[in-house]
Image: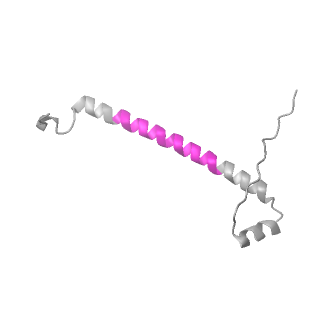
């Protein structure tokens, strides 16, 4: 069985608050791994939020269509079109 391969690494340049970096380093944190983990978590939250918003939009369209189907469009009786 083949061992899973690590994802390809890319070197990037970031500008971070000097005091924050010093504090993290003083605690022995690996900044690259820490930033990567936090970015993964942030992107996962954003993906869940995007999916939730899409589901809510779909539910709104469905509910609005049901109201229009039942009651018709507001002001339709006054339309001259």
Residue toward you, 30 or 52? 30
Residue toward you, 13 or 31? 13
Q: Position of residue 58 (x, y in %)?
A: 42, 35
At 86% from the left and 33% from the top, the residue drawn is 3
In this picture, is 44 found above or below 67? below
At 78% from the left and 41% from the top, the residue drawn is 7
At 47% from the left and 39% from the top, the residue drawn is 54
Residue toward you, 66 or 40? 40
Residue 19 shown left or right of residue 70 in the figure: right
Q: Position of residue 32 (x, y in %)?
A: 77, 56
Q: Quadrant of residue 2?
A: top right
Q: Position of residue 70 (x, y in %)?
A: 25, 30
Say whether residue 54 is magenta: yes
In this picture, is 74 found above or below 18? above
In this picture, is 11 found above or below 2? below
Q: Position of residue 63 (x, y in %)?
A: 35, 35
Residue 56 shown left or right of residue 74 in the figure: right
Say whether residue 4 is magenta: no
Q: Which residues are magenta?
A: 42-63
Q: In the rendered image, which quarter contains the C terminus?
A: top left
Q: Quadrant of residue 69?
A: top left
Q: Main secondary structure of the magenta part?
A: helix
């Amino acid at each position: 069985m083949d061992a899973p391969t690590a994802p390809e690494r890319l070197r990037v340049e970031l500008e971070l608050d000097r005091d924050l970096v010093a504090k993290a380093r003083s605690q022995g944190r690996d900044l690259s791994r820490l930033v990567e983990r936090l970015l993964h978590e942030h992107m996962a939250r954003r993906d869940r939020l995007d999916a939730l918003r899409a589901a809510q939009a779909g539910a709104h369209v469905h509910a609005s269509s049901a109201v229009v189907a039942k009651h018709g469009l507001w002001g339709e009786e006054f339309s001259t079109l």
